Amino acid sequence: MSFDTPTLLAGLLVSSIGFVLLSYGKKMSRPPHMLTGLILLVYPYFVPGAILTFAIAAVLLGALWFAVKNGY
């Protein structure tokens, strides 16, 4: 794991979004939100750069949006 400032701030931002999604999904009993939130909380520890962290987060949030839009 890289300890430069942009990577740490990207991980903090993505993990914060993951925490909110996990909390919302748990409260509303929404499995897609809980799963996406959990993944967003964990994966920044294993990704070595800020740009890659944001790119993976965008893909995951896009997949969540697509799943919710299609009724899941």
Image: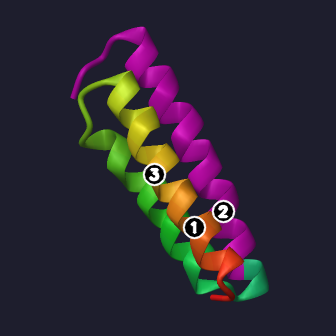
- Looking at numbered disc 1 in the image, what kind of residue is underneath it? Leu
Residue under pointer 2: 21
Circle 3: element type:
helix
- Image spot of residue 72 (x, y percent): 63, 88
Q: Which residue is mark 3?
A: 59
Q: Of the residues under marks 3 and 1, which one precedes in the sequence?
A: 3
Q: Which amino acid, by three-letter code, is at mark 3? A: Val
Query: Along the horizontal axis of the image, is 34 left or right of 27?
Result: left
Using the image, determine if residue 62 lies above or below residue 66: above
- Is residue 20 one of those drawn in magenta? yes
Count up the numbered dots. Answer: 3
Q: For the magenta stretch, what is the residue range?
A: 1-26
Quadrant assignment for the N terminus: top left
Give the residue pinned by disc 1: 64
The disc at residue 32 is none
Q: Secondary structure at mark 2?
A: helix
Query: In front: mark 2 or mark 1?
Result: 1
